[in-house]
Image (tube, grey):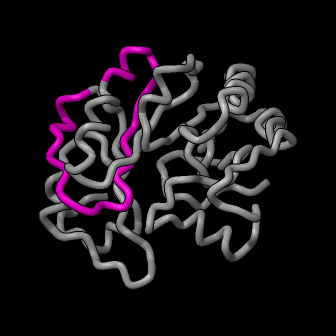
Amino acid sequence: MQKTKIDWPGLDYTWNPVIGCKRNCFYCYAKRMNTRFKWIPDWNKPQYFPNRLEIPLKVERPSTWFVGSISDICYWYTIWILNVLAICKICNQHKFMFLTKQPDIYNHLTFPLNCMLGLTINSDADYKKYADFLNIHERGNKTFLSIEPLLGTVNLSLSETCIDLVIVGADSTKGAKPPKKEWIESIKHPNIHWKANIKKYLSLGVS
């Protein structure tokens, strides 16, 4: 097990008991990696690896884990998620970060409070998903928004909501156009983590 290179604040490890995703986003790095390394034969048919459930149990030091970095939990069978959440509850010294493009998945399950619940959006076009996500904070879990890749303006009054963290990244696919200045400047929130792949486009002096 190695530390992850994913540019999220405080992130230590990824944990992938499921591989694969049905969404087929054009910018999906995980699908490209699967094409290269052949983790599973069909990317559109997520596969469950129960032998990976015990991985966080082997780490005693409090750490932060990104759960499902090469999948989307909205496509997992309920029993898969329940098995993962059981481990999260046992490993209460750790923090687990979940991420999806379908926030209604959070409404059907009870996540331990050491689980941080996230939503991916790309622009204002994802307003409906964002609106559905806002009530999640009432459950007591910390929340975050992943705007990656940034593909348009994000005028969603983020500073007026209960989002705890916003992570912003650029499109890293080959030949991708850089994000426009007005897209970047549209994002307003008191706790923004600008990923390294977008900092090079900033003239805002962010750190």
Q: Nearer the viewer, residue 20 or 61?
A: 20
Question: From this viewpoint, which residue is outermost toward the bottom?
Answer: 175
Residue 109 against residue 3 in the figure, above or below: above
Residue 61 against residue 17 in the figure, above or below: above
Residue 42 point in image, percent of width and height: 70, 62
Q: Is residue 84 left or right of residue 95?
A: right
Total labels: the figure holds: 0
Residue 32 point in image, percent of width and height: 59, 72
Which residues, given as a range, are shown in magenta?
Answer: 135-161
The structure residue drawn at horizontal position 57% and vertical position 21%, both measured from the top left corner, is 111
Q: Is residue 94 left or right of residue 126?
A: right
Q: Which quarter of the rendered picture does the N terminus lie within?
A: bottom right
Residue 110 against residue 154 in the figure, above or below: above
Q: Nearer the viewer, residue 153 or 140?
A: 153
The structure residue drawn at horizontal position 31% and vertical position 47%, both measured from the top left corner, is 192
Asked if the stretch drawn in magenta spans residue 140, the answer is yes
Residue 10 against residue 198 in the figure, above or below: above
The structure residue drawn at horizontal position 14% and vertical position 46%, both measured from the top left corner, is 155
Q: Is residue 67 left or right of residue 166?
A: right
The structure residue drawn at horizontal position 62% and vertical position 42%, both measured from the top left corner, is 67
Residue 41 point in image, percent of width and height: 76, 64
Q: Which quarter of the rendered picture does the C terminus lie within?
A: bottom left
Q: Nearer the viewer, residue 185 or 37?
A: 37
Asked if the stretch drawn in magenta spans residue 117, the answer is no
Quarter holding residue 130? top left
